[in-house]
Image (tube, rainbow, N blue to C red):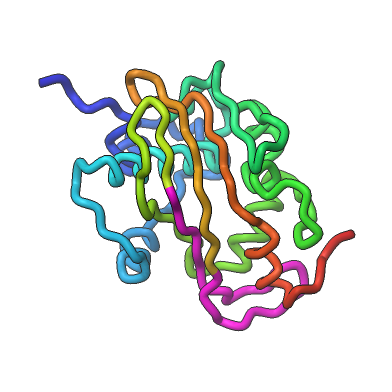
Amino acid sequence: MSETPLWLQGRTAVIEAADQAEWRHGTPDYHLSHTVMPGQRTTEHAPGSLEAIVESIVQVFEMEVSHKKDPSTWVSMVTEHFRTNVNGGPWASAQDIADTGSYNVLVGDSPFYKPESFDGQHDVFHGAFPNGFYWEVLEVLSPPPVVTFKWRHWGSFDGEYHGHQPNGKTIEMYGLSVAKVDDDLKLLEVEHYYDPNQFLSKLTGGCPVAH
């Protein structure tokens, strides 16, 4: 039996295999995902199930685009072919994400979010969710090579967001994504469908932070 490819072994394996020079600000820390997230998630996927595999791939992807500087080191995708968009909007390449930042790309144009620098975008959301901002696969609707899946993203609003004070409530958003993968299950293209304003407005009490 052939060895499981690195990008299918999960975040811990990818972190251990990476050169320290690849990280933007040192090795990322996911201890809250191991200690807090299990008690807050709404789904449990059997090891090796399609749902578990999809969740792991997306977790590796999110880690790489957030913490690895050079897209050529991202193992979760076919970097030179990868592209992504939100709600049918403009496509962004791997380099676009590395330059602009995943939150800036995935939130897009919203009256409740002011685009930040690469580091600034992470500071905004890590500041609003200091106890973790988690993501889980709810259901996989179609198998490779075109994987359609529903997901949930959530966290406890315990920190300030653009001057708006926290209320300690769990803020959730739900969406659907369509991912095209190659024969090795590396990402080629991902389309996301969700309403960012419904989520962000809960952080601002419905008051836009930018016009």
Q: In which quarter of the image is the N terminus?
A: top left
Along the horizontal axis of the image, is 21 left or right of 47?
A: right
Residue at (51% x, 68% y) in the render: 155
**Residue 78 within the segment the image draws in magenta:** no
Instruction: Give the image location of residue 54, x and y in percent.
Output: 35, 40
Along the horizontal axis of the image, is 71 left or right of 53?
A: right
Residue at (54% x, 80% y) in the render: 169
Instruction: Determine whether 193 is above or below 40 in the image.
Output: above
Instruction: Determine whether 203 is above or below 124 in the image.
Output: below
- The answer to whether residue 153 of the structure is visible from this angle is yes
For the residue pair 6 and 205, the one nearer the viewer reads as 205
Q: In which quarter of the image is residue 99?
A: top right
Residue at (65% x, 43% y) in the render: 87
For the residue pair 4 and 122, the one nearer the viewer reads as 4
Instruction: Determine whether 29 is above or below 203 in the image.
Output: above
Instruction: Give the image location of residue 55, x and y in percent.
Output: 36, 45
Residue at (62% x, 42% y) in the render: 102
Instruction: Give the image location of residue 163, x and y in percent.
Output: 77, 73
**Residue 158 within the segment the image draws in magenta:** yes
Along the horizontal axis of the image, is 118 left or right of 178?
A: right
Q: Quadrant of residue 53?
A: top left
Q: What stretch is highlighted in magenta?
A: 150-171
Looking at this rendering, what residue extends furthest in the front direction?
141
Instruction: Give the image location of residue 34, x and y in percent.
Output: 32, 60
